[in-house]
Image (cartoon, rainbow, N blue to C red):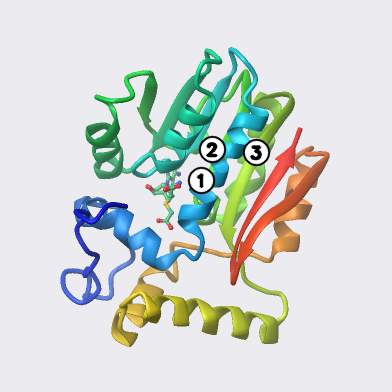
Amino acid sequence: MTDSDPRDRLFTETKASGADFVFDETVAAVFPDMIERSVPGYPAIINMIQLLTERYAQPGSTLLDLGCSLGAATLALARGSSGRGCRVIGIDNAPAMLARAQSLLAADHPQIEWRLGDIREAAIQGASIVVLNFTLQFLPPADRLSLLQRIHAGLEVGGVLILSEKIAGPDPLADALLIEMHHAFKRANGYSELEISRKRSALENVLVPEPLQAHRQRLAEAGFVRADPWFQCFNFVSLVARR
Ligand code: GEK
């Protein structure tokens, strides 16, 4: 995010209707500010994806960012693999998000390929890194295992999936503290109680968080030999799953 990024005031204004959250032009316009003020640790996760890329990008392989939004993690993949002849591809099914990613990054990073499409149908092959940075949570739970199986099948031996998710459950007392602290984080970043509660309702049917253990079990079922958390801040977690 830069000082010139427009501030997210969507839930004081245009999105006060109670409708489900969608990644449209109004969201794309404020997305860097929105995600930084809403997801604890997001800038650190993006920086660490670059370091993980330096560690895991195999020369000549493909690096995929699934649900790339404005391409922050895609750029981390490109920077971290510089000089290794990798193909870096960002995929998103929201036209407004992908168009903005391209307008922000295409000129300075012409090697990045951008694809408008559903990640459930994306071709995945010859990959050494696949990123799902807060994207799996937007798929219906019934669609999650088959995507992870396709990612596993499309990864080279030694390749990794970087999976970041908002988590919830199974312990309501543990959850209560994490949710309270997440809301404290948002208040400290200038969101009002009204904005927090409106956003929460808008995401209710759209973002379905699961327990960390459910993710680890599903990753094992999809064939990953290990899935290790490398980051957690409140109810936001990132794992490295190894093929
Ligand atoms: C980042 N990874 O900045 N197919 C393709 N894209 C999808 C699908 C789908 N089925 N479902 C949702 N998306 C980014 C942040 S945001 C997370 C990811 C958030 C896309 C959706 O259009 C949006 O751009 C992204 O997944 C989720 O590192 O806003 O909390």
Which residue is depicted at the point 51% across and 45% down? 47
Task: Please name the residue shown 33% across and 24% down the image.
Answer: 109
Identify the residue shown where x is 19% and y is 58%.
6
Residue 51: % across, % down: 59, 38
Task: Identify the amino acid type marked 1.
Answer: Asn
Give the Cα separation between the discs numbered 2 and 1. 5 Å
Whether the residue carrying mark 1 lies under 8 Å from ligand 1 is answered with no
Q: Spatial distance from mark 3 to mark 1, Cα to Cα?
A: 16 Å
Residue type (three-letter) at the residue carrying disc 2:
Gln
Q: Which residue is mark 2?
A: 50
Residue 161, disc = 3
Amino acid carrying label 3: it is Leu
Label 3 residue SS: strand
15 versus 158 height, above or below:
below
Q: In the image, residue 66 lies at what x, y percent?
A: 49, 38
Mark 3: give few (<14), some (14-19) or many (20+) Cα within 10 Å: many
Residue hosting label 1: 47
Q: Earlier in the sequence, mark 3 or mark 1?
A: 1
> Disc 2, disc 1: CB below 8 Å?
yes
